[in-house]
Amino acid sequence: FVFCCTSAFFLLYTADNYSINWDELRVWSAMPKAIYETKQLQLGAGALIFDSGDNMQTYPPALPLFANFFLSAAPVFKESYIFLAYAVFVSAITASPFPDLRWKHWWLIPIAFIFVTCAPFVLTLHGGDNSYFYESLYIDPVLGFATGYVCYLATAKPFRSGFDRIRFALALGVLVIIKDTGILFAALSVVCALVICRFEDKPSFPVLARKLAIPAGLMLLPYFLWKGLLQHYHITNHVSLQIRLPAAQVVGALTDVLLHAPIINLLVFGLSFLT
């Protein structure tokens, strides 16, 4: 119910949104539009918005394809539906802490609604006016929320049942095709899940390997399918994946967490305890 309410709210809130930033105009809003018009991925010489071999063609297609589903379902093309797709995608993640919310706790629904709608905005305040969530199409906040969700699943016994393994596997599969760095976060989440499972449940290594098969397979399959598709079109990623942690950025990130996390954690803890 909370997810449906927030989706309706986002439909109204993003109704007049349009792209204004450079990265939106050349990639994140342009790619869904091109897919909508051509009904195909923007790869190779036939790409509508990129030259053949353009490094922009190497960007994974998860969010542009997801936005295209919204555009294709609409009676007419409207750029604001791309913003709506981003909002709905993230709200599905931020609404996940409230699966057991019951009507007898109706008074918690407005609190959950405020959390689901405000958390993405609060966590992107440090980027300035051009990167507020719901107001921009930058991919990094979506990647961050997807990574957070996968990390949450990794610590919540993701190998406990077949459903948990499939849910974890699908989340990993989506994460790796949001952005190239997603494979790094996905791999780290799998390692954390394995370590936690090994120390808490103490399964034998053959049993642990069988539990890992589905998540690892669905994590690697979309990643290598996308890389194989790029190889087929002779597209090379000229941007190297570098991991750098400048001291100023680390301090800034920790400051954001210290300022915002207590409020969010308090809401989540209170709601989960009461429900």
Image (cartoon, grey):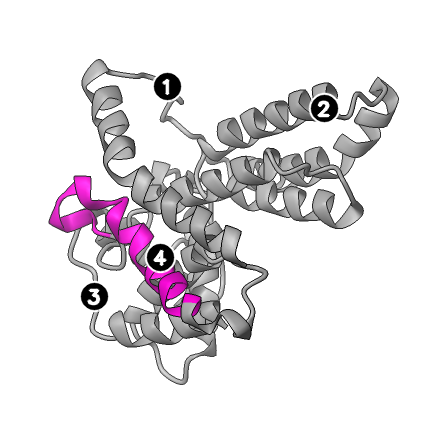
For residue 89, side relative to residue 77 (left or right): right
Query: Label 2: which residue?
Result: 200
For residue 230, side relative to residue 237 (left or right): right
Is residue 216 visible in the rendered image? The answer is: yes
Amino acid type for the residue under numbered disc 2: Glu
Query: Is the residue under label 4 in contact with that under label 3 (CB below 8 Å)?
Result: no
For residue 210, side relative to residue 261 (left or right): right
Image quadrant in which you'd find residue 225: top right
What kind of element bears circle 1?
loop
Query: Is the residue under label 1 in contact with that under label 2 (CB below 8 Å)?
Result: no
Q: Dot 2: within a 10 Å radius of its alpha carbon, few (fewer than 14), some, or many (20 or more) residues?
A: few
Name the residue rendered at 54%, 73% in the picture.
104
Q: Position of residue 46 (x, y in %)?
A: 43, 54
- Tell which of 185 and 71 is nearer to you: 185
Of the image marks 2 and 1, the number of the one nearer the N terminus: 2
Query: Label 3: which residue?
Result: 18
Q: Residue 103 lies in magenta, yes or no?
A: no
Give the magenta range.
108-132
Q: Position of residue 243 (x, y in %)?
A: 37, 18
Q: CA distance from mark 4 to mark 1?
A: 34 Å
Of the image marks 4 and 1, the number of the one nearer the N terminus: 4
Task: Look at discs 3 and 2 and give the one toward the viewer.
Answer: 2
Query: Label 1: which residue?
Result: 242
| Quadrant location, the C terminus | bottom right
Q: CA distance from mark 3 to mark 1?
A: 32 Å
Query: Label 4: which residue?
Result: 115
